[in-house]
Amino acid sequence: MTIEDEEGFEDVEFDTPAGSFRAGRGRAWAEDEELRIVRRQVRRKMRFYRHLTTFVTVILLLLVIDIATGPSDFWVQWVALIWGLILLVHFLNVFAFDALLGRDAEKRMLERELKRRRGE
């Protein structure tokens, strides 16, 4: 995504699995920090929901193929189990671990440490 400010400088924002960052030579982005945090959280949740939708669609398709090929081996359960475990890890990473180990937890720990050092 390319962002151009009033002076014509362009900044580029990169979204990666490890996080997002900006590069460029323009002025600081006028976006509020809270809005960026919320946007990042919403994007992570949307990626999980897309992953869940893909999982359901593909497993249903594989189930139809498995049933159509005959009663020999019921193999789709193994695909669903392995992918389901991966989906569970993704869910925990987005909804549970972020609160425990994410940026918000880091911010809370920093604030607590600063208060402790100031004697509050």
Image (tube, rainbow, N blue to C red):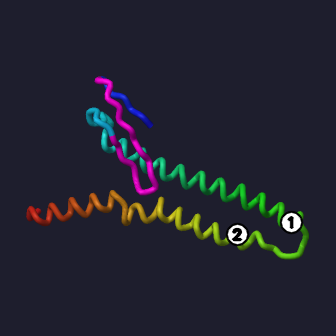
By secondary structure, the bulk of the magenta-drawn segment is best described as: strand
Which quadrant holds residue 96? bottom left
Q: CA distance from mark 2 to mark 1?
A: 14 Å
Q: Amino acid at mark 2?
A: Val
Q: Which residues are magenta?
A: 7-23
Residue visible at 32% across and 62% down in the picture: 105
Q: Secondary structure at mark 1?
A: helix
Q: Which quadrant: the N terminus? A: top left
Q: Position of residue 54 (x, y in %)?
A: 66, 54
Q: Position of residue 80 (x, y in %)?
A: 69, 68
In front here: 11 or 44?
11
In front here: 8 or 39?
8
In front here: 69 or 114?
69
In front here: 61 or 23?
23
Left or right: where 111 falls relative to 22: left
Q: Which quadrant: the C terminus? A: bottom left
Q: Secondary structure at mark 2?
A: helix
Which quadrant holds residue 35? top left
Compared with 75, 109 (above or below) is: above
Which residue in the protein does label 1 denote? Answer: 67
* First of labels 2, 1 by sequence position: 1
Q: Amino acid at mark 1?
A: Ile
Q: Position of residue 87 (x, y in %)?
A: 58, 64
Q: Residues within 10 Å of mark 1 (few under 14, many from 20)?
A: some
Which residue in the protein does label 2 denote? Answer: 79
Which quadrant holds residue 111? bottom left
Residue visible at 39% across and 41% down in the picture: 13
Residue visible at 28% across and 33% down in the picture: 26
Residue visible at 67% across and 72% down in the picture: 81
